[in-house]
Amino acid sequence: MSVVVSSPSSEQDFPSTGSWEDQARFCLRYALLAPSTHNAQPWLFRIVEGAIELRADRSRGLAVSDPFDRELSISCGAALFNLQRAGHVYSRISN
């Protein structure tokens, strides 16, 4: 299932009383703001069975400037880092 996620608004919008999925979607907004090579945004996120999956979207790879997908992997790592940081910050709010 695909979910459209908009940019984060503010901390007051965090669904502290919402479900885990609502909180995960909120944190994913920050992951999507991660920098990527040529703004390719080569990642796919899915919320599945109480977990967030991150997959590299190889169709968004840059065959000429990044033939071995090194920068694609780094971009996915940046998105994962943003998600991790958002989860850490907002876990303090929900407790």
Image (cartoon, rainbow, N blue to C red):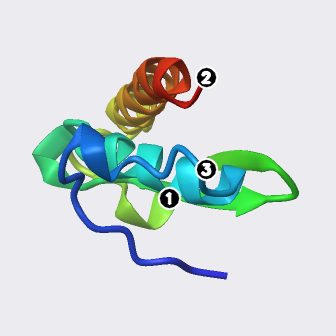
Residue 80 location in percent, x, y?
48, 31
Real-space CA distance between mark 1 and mark 3, rounded to the nearest whole angstrom: 6 Å
Real-space CA distance between mark 2 and mark 1, rounded to the nearest whole angstrom: 34 Å
Q: Residue at x 51, y 77 (%)?
A: 3
Q: Residues within 10 Å of mark 1 (few under 14, many from 20)?
A: some
Q: Residue at x 19, y 40 (%)?
A: 37
Q: Residue furthest left?
A: 38
In the rendered structure, which amino acid carries the disc numbered 3?
Answer: Arg
| N-terminal label among 2 and 3 | 3
Residue 6 vs residue 27: left or right? left
- Residue 30 quadrant: top left
What element does badge 2 sit on? loop
What element does badge 3 sit on? strand
Circle nearer the viewer, 2 or 3: 2
Circle nearer the viewer, 2 or 1: 2
What element does badge 1 sit on? loop
Q: Residues within 10 Å of mark 2 (few under 14, many from 20)?
A: few
Disc 2: which residue? 95
